[in-house]
Image (tube, rainbow, N blue to C red):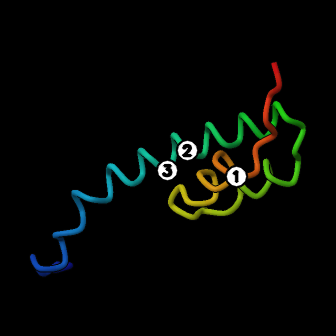
Amino acid sequence: MWYYPHYLLWWFPLLIPLVIVDVILKAIGAWKAARNNQLTWFIFILIINTAGILPLIYILFFQKKIRK
């Protein structure tokens, strides 16, 4: 039987929102990279897990700007 000390479980409630934010940012980043025909960014966003940091960097700095 496995025993988990209570002092190690304080981070678990923080994990659920982090996973949700990561999935949302990864989906938005991959979608925008695919629409902009940026295959390299699309592959990196899908493969590398960075807790939402890589998709956020792409969305803020490297996404092609749409001119109206």
Q: Residue furthest front?
A: 68
The x and y percentages for residue 59 are: 66, 45
Upstream in sequence: badge 1 or badge 3: 3
Tag 1, which secondary structure? helix
Amino acid beneath label 3: Asp
Q: Mark 2 points at which residue?
A: 25
Tag 3, which secondary structure? helix
Point 61% across, 39% down: residue: 27
Q: In this view, does 33 lie to the left or right of 59?
A: right
Count neighbours of disc 1 (C-alpha within 10 A) and say few if under 14, some if 14 to 19, many if 20 or more: few
Residue contact between numbered discs 3 and 2, judged by CB atoms under 8 Å = yes
Q: As displayed, is residue 64 above or below residue 1?
A: above
Point 52% across, 45% down: residue: 23
User: Mark 1 and mark 2: span between their CA atoms?
Assistant: 14 Å
Point 57% across, 64% down: residue: 50
The x and y percentages for residue 29 are: 66, 43
